Image (cartoon, grey):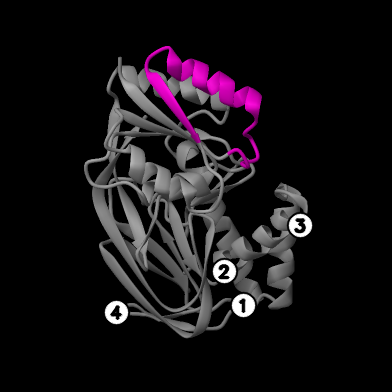
Amino acid sequence: MPRVALIVNPFASAVDEHRIKLVEGALARTADVATHLTERRGHATEIAQLVSDDVDAIFVYSGDGGFNEVVNGLGPDAPPLGCIPGGGTSVFPRGLGISRDPVTATEQLVEAFDQRRTRRISVGRVNGRRFLFNAGLLFDAELVRRIEAQRSQAGRPGDVAFAATLLKFIAERRGRFDPVLEIDGVGRAAFVLVANADPYTFLGSIAVHVAPEATHEAGLYAIAPTRVRPRHIPQMCRYVVTGRRRPRSVLAVQDVDRLEVRCDRPLPLQADGEDLGDVTEAVFEAEREVLSVLV
């Protein structure tokens, strides 16, 4: 009988003991299951490194942070990965067409495992840290930092709280973002959003299309507004919701293997919704077709 590992973040917002048992039961119908609960930040990476050589697949029941940690623990010959949505957003599995319901998603992934239905995808990397769907300097990284601060105080903020945080951040800047970084070979910009897939993220049920041409099999795509003024904001909002009519003030980079950015001052950096601290330089790289995922 095949052997699989189930890595669970018990602190994720859509994870509880009852659902863990249901997920384990669905997996046990097709394989021997060894369940590993994470205990701290970075623990999923350690578990993935330990188990990847001894199992036929790795299933992860978590939010996007847990998926990110596991991918950062996998080598080039790792078994296929199945991501079960356990977070409030779970961008990565949703982008692959997997159900938001953890039990339904597990059934879909078990079927894919039984039929050996996998997809070889690329991942991004920024300053050595892998990411599955997005990374950014300044704008979204600052939002990630503020949301994390709210989470530590009162649990995961909902969509209304996120929208309020976004509007407050823009209001603090009076809708103005001036050039503060240089993208080698591209030019100066106010901030950078780098996509490894489309959608870039979700706001509730709304998909955000920063780089609608991006695919999991391609290189990196990036957009970088040269500067932002209040009059630009409606145009940018329309673009990210529809994925059409990118404003002329926004620089675009498509399907590249490497992007180097130098900052005028330390700026916040995020990858897959994880705060990576402040940096003065960021090197974004594509690792093409290095990861097998169950779909």
Gap in Å between the C-alphas at discs 4 and 2? 21 Å
Mark 1 or 4, nearer chain start: 4
Q: Is residue 30 magenta?
A: yes
Of residue 133 and residue 43, the one placed in the foreground of this image is: 43
Single out the mark in the foreground, 3 or 1: 3
Q: Residues within 10 Å of mark 3 (few under 14, many from 20)?
A: few
Amino acid type at image mark 2: Phe
Residue at far right of view: 154
How many residues crowd around disc 2 within 10 Å: few (fewer than 14), some, or many (20 or more)? many
Find the magenta span and give its range.
Answer: 10-36
Q: Which circle marks residue 185 in the picture?
A: 4
Report helix, strand or loop for mark 3: helix
Secondary structure at badge 1 equals: loop
Alpha-carbon neighbours of circle 4 within 10 Å: few (<14), some, or many (≥20)? few
Q: Earlier in the sequence, mark 4 or mark 2?
A: 2
Q: CA distance from mark 3 to mark 4?
A: 42 Å
To which quarter of the image does residue 187 belong?
A: bottom left
Q: Pointers 3 and 1 in contact (CB under 8 A)? A: no
The N terminus, quarter of image: top left
Residue 129, image quadrant: bottom left
Q: In the image, what residue occupies the spot 28% across and 35% down?
A: 79
Where residue 139 sits: x, y (%)? 57, 69
Three-letter amino acid code of the residue under disc 3: Gln
Vertical arrangement, residue 177 with respect to residue 2, above or below? below
For the residues labelled 1 and 4, the Cα–Cα distance comes to 24 Å
Question: Secondary structure under badge 4?
Answer: loop
- The circle on residue 229 is 1
Closer to the camera in the image, 133 or 63: 63
Task: Report which residue position mark 2 lands on.
Answer: 139
Give me the C-alpha separation between circle 1 and circle 2: 14 Å
Quarter of the C terminus within the rendering = top left
Q: Which mark is residue 31?
A: none
